[in-house]
Amino acid sequence: MALILHGTVGSPATFRALAALYEKDLHVDFVPVSLANKENKSPHFLSLNPFGQVPVFEHGDLKLFESRAITKYVAEAFADKGTSLVFKDPMKSAIQTVWMEVEAQKFDPASSKLGWELFFKPLFGMTTDEAVVAEFEKKLEPVLDVYEQRLAESKYLGGDSFTLADLHHLPNTYLLMGTKVKSLFDARPHVSAWVSDILSRPAWTKVAVMRPN
């Protein structure tokens, strides 16, 4: 059965799903969705995702939205392919899940806001709100402090190997590396080494070349 991903080039959520598919060495038919033309609000797209957001993943009769749900399915459904992105041991899996939740609940809110202000607004010819940037830098710093402590004890956030806990960070981290917020990561040596590691993965490199300039 064909694997189909409906998404938008440059969308962090779309890139998160693609990264998981490429880590698994899977062929995926990518269907571009134009947000500018409101293709995500078309009746057909809304039949796939009633919230009208990208990405949407199809595998036979299965239709999934929400990028983290997609990556989890891909990791589990294709466990024998490519990189093992999840732990089978229940205790290791539980720890991995903790850091997946940390990404979604702690890292993503601040990093997404910073990515919008510092990357996407300039891309769209809009003016960055420096007050908002300062506010969310302060929110990101304590999260990175916790990461620095964790990564001093473990090579990756989820454990001793690269997993979804790390992969989920890739899109926003990549965008922020081209902004002044990079200094927050660089100031923490273990975080900086981890960032260099995960951003250099071949699967992510394949995704990153799609990024709009």
Image (spheres, rainbow, N blue to C red):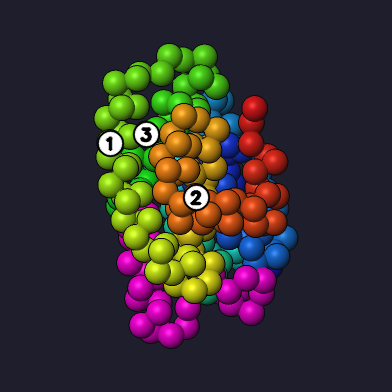
Q: Amino acid at mark 1?
A: Lys
Disc on the earlier residue, 1 or 2: 1
Q: CA distance from mark 1 to mark 2?
A: 18 Å
- The location of residue 163, given as percent across then percent down, is 51, 67
Q: Residues within 10 Å of mark 3 (few under 14, many from 20)?
A: some
Provide the residue designation for mark 2.
Answer: 192
Q: Please name whichever residue, 1 or 213, is drawn nearer the observer in this view of the structure.
A: 213
Residue in view at x 64 percent, y 53 percent: 200
Q: Which residues are magenta?
A: 77-104
Q: Which residue is mark 1?
A: 138
Tell me the CA gap for discs 2 and 3.
21 Å
Residue at the spot 55% in from the left edge and 22% down from the top edge: 123
Q: Is residue 7 visible?
A: yes
In this picture, is 81 found above or below 11? below
* Residue 73 appearing in the image: no
Q: Which residue is mark 3?
A: 113
Q: Mark 3 or mark 1: which comes first in sequence?
A: 3
In the image: residue 78, left or right of residue 29:
left
- Dot 1 crowding, Cα within 10 Å, few <14, some 14–19, many 20+: few
